Amino acid sequence: MIQRVAIFISGGGSNMVSLVQDMLSGGHPATPVLVLANDADAGGLKKAADMGVATAVVDHRPFKGDRPAFEAALQLELDKVQPDILCLAGFMRVLTEGFVAPWEGRMLNIHPSLLPKYKGLQTHARALEAGETEHGCSVHLVTPALDDGPILGQARVPVLADDTPDTLAARVLEQEHRLYPAALRRFAAGDRTRFDL
């Protein structure tokens, strides 16, 4: 059975584009049914529409201070398309346990570090400050704890002597665009074993 996938974004959606292109390439165990953004100006919305994927917007700002109401609005959009899998792809809102728990085991996220190192933000700068010799990205299952779920896959890049947070981020992003589609393809086919690219 083909798995139905919804993707949450907040910005340009480059990881979303990688996921959708892979799903549309043929012979894939999943199909994209929705790209949802929390900002109507998110550049990824047009990219998704141009690829023929339905889009929706749930702006978080009117819900200021009421996360459960924001998440209820998110779930309403999901209910319309009935996805089997939810992929977070640069979605810059922290989701509460009330939203995550019903999706546990079916929600994936990509994070720009070799988890469990550097949960949260500013991962590239933190890796450089720590003197790391390698850095990378991880795809993991989402749990209520931030960036804490079981790791499905990782990709690594060497840290170069002249790296800045921006140069390191650019190299990691290239690997994200390879890792996330590979992880989703395996996951949708029922393979939960951890792998490295």
Image (tube, grey):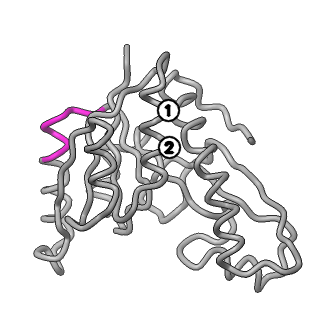
Can you identify the residue that label 2 sits on? 18
Which residue is at the front of the view, 76 or 128?
128
Bounds of the magenta span?
A: 77-83
Which percent across, then down, holds residue 195? 71, 37
Q: Residues within 10 Å of mark 1 (few under 14, many from 20)?
A: many
Q: Is residue 149 left or right of residue 11?
A: right
Which residue type carries mark 1? Asp
Residue name at image x 48 percent, y 25 percent:
25
> What secondary structure is the magenta-colored segment mainly?
helix
- Tell me: residue 128, above or below residue 103: below
Which residue is at the front of the view, 102 or 30?
30
Task: Determine which quarter of the picture holds residue 52.
Answer: top left
Q: Residues within 10 Å of mark 2 (few under 14, many from 20)?
A: some
User: Is residue 79 located in the magenta-colored stretch of the structure?
Assistant: yes
Q: CA distance from mark 1 to mark 2?
A: 6 Å
- Judged from the image, the secondary structure of the residue bearing numbered disc 1 is helix
Which residue type carries mark 2? Ser
Which percent across, then down, holds residue 175? 67, 52
User: Is residue 81 located in the magenta-colored stretch of the structure?
Assistant: yes
- Judged from the image, the secondary structure of the residue bearing numbered disc 2 is helix
Q: Is residue 146 left or right of residue 130?
A: left
Can you identify the residue that label 1 sits on? 22
Residue name at image x 49 percent, y 16 percent:
27
